Image (spheres, grey):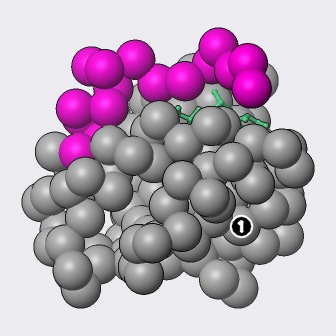
């Protein structure tokens, strides 16, 4: 599978650091891609933490699902995050490293805490 929009290692390390800061956190990722960012988050995920990542490309979602199938607290969902995250999504922290949307109208806004760096990344990824 060819995929060239994965997070760079610097972003991955930031994701891991933010994840490690909340050992019982509930995390969401908007746009799994092929799972690079999710792998960084998974590498720092506490045993009591929960992580949901959503990808609307079927092939990518399936590949990432296989990659993480043995991790009980990580779920890869296939579909549009606008539809899937409000009912199934976590509330502690949300990462977007590429999927587009409008933060100001996001249904996640009311129950999601954004770090300033993630808010900046989100803003620059939306038009
Ligand atoms: C830049 S890539 C993600 C990179 C990945 N997060 C990482 O860290 O390596 C953006 C992904 O968002 C997905 N995407 C775009 N719009 C989406 C939506 N509305 N819902 C779910 N996924 C979406 C795209 O298919 C693409 O795979």
Q: Is residue 115 visible?
A: no
| Magenta residue check for 2 | yes
From the top left corner, tell me how far across and down residue 52 is, in percent. Answer: 54, 68
From the top left corner, tell me how far across and down residue 112 is, in percent. Answer: 47, 68
Which image quarter: residue 57? Answer: top right
For the residue pair 14 and 124, the one nearer the viewer reads as 14
| Magenta residue check for 11 | yes
For the residue pair 7 and 99, the one nearer the viewer reads as 7
Left/right of residue 50 with respect to residue 48 in the rendered view = right
- Assign the N terminus to one quadrant of the image: top right
For the residue pair 9 and 21, the one nearer the viewer reads as 9
Give above or below for 63 relative to 13: below
Report the residue at 80% width, 62% height from top.
Answer: 78
Report the residue at 32% width, 43% height from top.
Answer: 40
Which image quarter: residue 89? Answer: bottom right
Estimate how packed mark 1 is, as few (under 14), some (14 to 19) or many (20 or more) residues with alpha carbons within 10 Å: many
Q: Please name the residue that numbered disc 1 is placed on.
A: 77
From the top left corner, tell me how far across and down residue 4 is, in percent. Answer: 65, 14
Mark 1 element type: strand
Report the residue at 44% width, 39% height from top.
Answer: 37
Left/right of residue 112 with respect to residue 26 in the rendered view = right
Magenta region, residue range = 1-16
Q: Is mark 1 within 8 Å of ligand 1?
A: no
């Amino acid at each position: 599978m060819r995929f060239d929009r994965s997070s760079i290692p610097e972003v991955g390390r930031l994701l891991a650091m933010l994840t490690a800061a909340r050992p019982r956190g509930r995390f969401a990722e908007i746009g799994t891609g092929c799972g690079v960012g999710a792998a960084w988050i998974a590498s720092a995920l506490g045993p009591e933490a929960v992580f949901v990542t959503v990808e609307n490309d079927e092939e990518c979602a399936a590949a990432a699902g296989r990659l993480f199938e043995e991790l009980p607290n990580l779920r890869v969902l296939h579909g549009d995050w606008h539809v899937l995250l409000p009912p199934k999504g976590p509330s502690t922290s949300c990462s977007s490293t590429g999927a587009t949307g409008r933060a100001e109208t996001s249904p996640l806004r009311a129950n999601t805490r954004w770090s300033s760096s993630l808010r900046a990344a989100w803003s620059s990824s939306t038009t």
